[in-house]
Image (cartoon, rainbow, N blue to C red):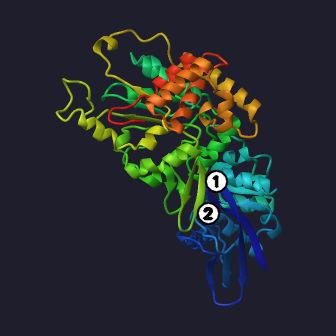
Amino acid sequence: MTAHAPTIAFAGIDCLDIDVQVQISSGFVGFTIVGLPDKAVAESRERVRAAFNSLGLALPPKRITVNLAPADLLKEGSHFDLPIALGLLAAMGVLPADEVAGYLSLGELGLDGSIAPVAGVLPAAIAANAADRGLICPGAQGSEAAWAGDLEILAAPHLLALINHFKGTQVLARPEPRLAEAEPSSLDLKDIKGQESAKRALEVAAAGGHNLLMIGPPGSGKSMLAARLPGLLPSLSPAEALEVSMIHSVAGQLAEGRLLSRRPFRDPHHSASTPSLVGGGQRARPGEISLAHLGVLFLDELPEFQRGALEALRQPLETGRASVARANAHVTYPARVQLVAAMNPCRCGYLGDPALACTKAPKCGADYQSKISGPMFDRIDLHVDVPAVSPADLSLPPPAEGSAEVAARVAAARTRQLERFARLCPERNIRCNAEADGQLLDEIATPDAQGQTLLSEAAERMRLSGRGYHRVLRVARTLADLDHSDTINRLHVAEALGYRRIMPGRSL
């Protein structure tokens, strides 16, 4: 008899059906797992054996063969422990084979029979619901699976509880979906004195989802401004929360199985490697740009990042997805992020200050900024100077307007954009102006006659690329939305052009 226990393998956030086939036959006593398992799957044999022993169950003295079909697909991860154990219990006659075959299962077994959390329960639950199957998962992740729909969910903390449920001596209640509680933030724009131009740029970036680069000397408040951007952004919608949480589930970063409610904010150190930023590694895991999907990716000390790592971000920033190609895997993760970067104007950080600048100025500024390629700069919509704060500014009382007032304007602008895109292109699921392109951008962001004249003259003088030209239009559209204006006028174009200046030592 061959018992079947369905499970899944992951290709990005997509799920591939895997049939765990268990056969107990006559022959030499042994326990063999075939079907291209990796090291973690091959070690399942010992974890399953120890878990059975802790329950007082002995493996039959026969030849046990476990096949993970299809056999030509690499199987990775410890989540195969539970389906292998269930298939073996069905083959031994402990559990009804037809009922086990009706569930998709995943989980890691402890030596005492406990079922430990694994990555990917949320996408697995969605796949099980689509296939009209139930789901068996670790007890700690039942609330995560409950968001997938009305499928039957058995969230068991221990293998014994699962056996008792199938035998009718214990009932595993269906878990309730839970949402991660949004912790109140103590970060407020009122904490920042001065820097009114930078605050305005931060508001524009939040309203339209635009990429932002802040340049200024050390201690001018660049990191403080970036840290307060999440407080200006609207909360995730239910569909967005599910989309973001699926990525974090695959990465094993959903705490207590709770769905995310706030937009992610990722701030990797400048020593981060290319795979950690874009994704990859032996198992092609999501990188920081995917973990920041529909949120903010903050790169502090931008020129200090590895040149190759920054260049690898160029395509995901443009397309909104990160494709990882390896010899044994080719996966794609969503990566629609808002990039916020900060940098000093030069190595010493005080370019333009005669009292503090080094003796190599201004050449040191051009050399330092040349670490960032022109195409990378071209993908950033807003460039803003953040000058040093004077002691006079620091002695002023806190500003009257804080994050709450700015967030209200941002929310109103975002609502206008959502309504516009839902009316013009409901099939494309565009969320903000930064995602508009092609004919749609021409339709929503064409300036009036005076604005178009100014844009044409400035584009020729500033030698804007085609990408730069369109990014100016997107920013101008956001400025008009903040003004509750249907028309983009000359003032909107002028301000948008002001954020796209020619930097020292570089022509954008």
Left of 483 or right of it: where is 428? right
**Quarter placement of the N terminus:** bottom right
- Decide: few, some or many residues near mark 2? Use Cα within 10 Å; few <14, some 14-19, many ≥20: many
State whether residue 451 is above or below residue 173: above
Residue name at image x 28 percent, y 35 percent = 365
| Mark 2 residue type | Gly
| Mark 1 residue type | Ile
Mark in front: 1 vs 2: 1
Front residue of 262/275: it is 275
- Residue 233 appears in the picture as rendered: no
SS class, disc 1:
loop
Image marks 1 and 2: residues in contact by CB distance under 8 Å: no
What residue would you read off at disc 2?
Answer: 113
What residue would you read off at disc 1?
Answer: 13
Front residue of 340/174: it is 340
Residue name at image x 54 percent, y 56 percent = 285
SS class, disc 2:
loop
User: Which label's residue is closer to the chain start, 1 or 2?
Assistant: 1
**Spot occupied by residue 495 in the image (x, y as percentages of width and height):** 50, 20
Left of 476 or right of it: where is 177? right
Residue 386 lies in quadrant: top left
**Quarter placement of the C terminus:** top left
Residue 164 lies in quadrant: bottom right
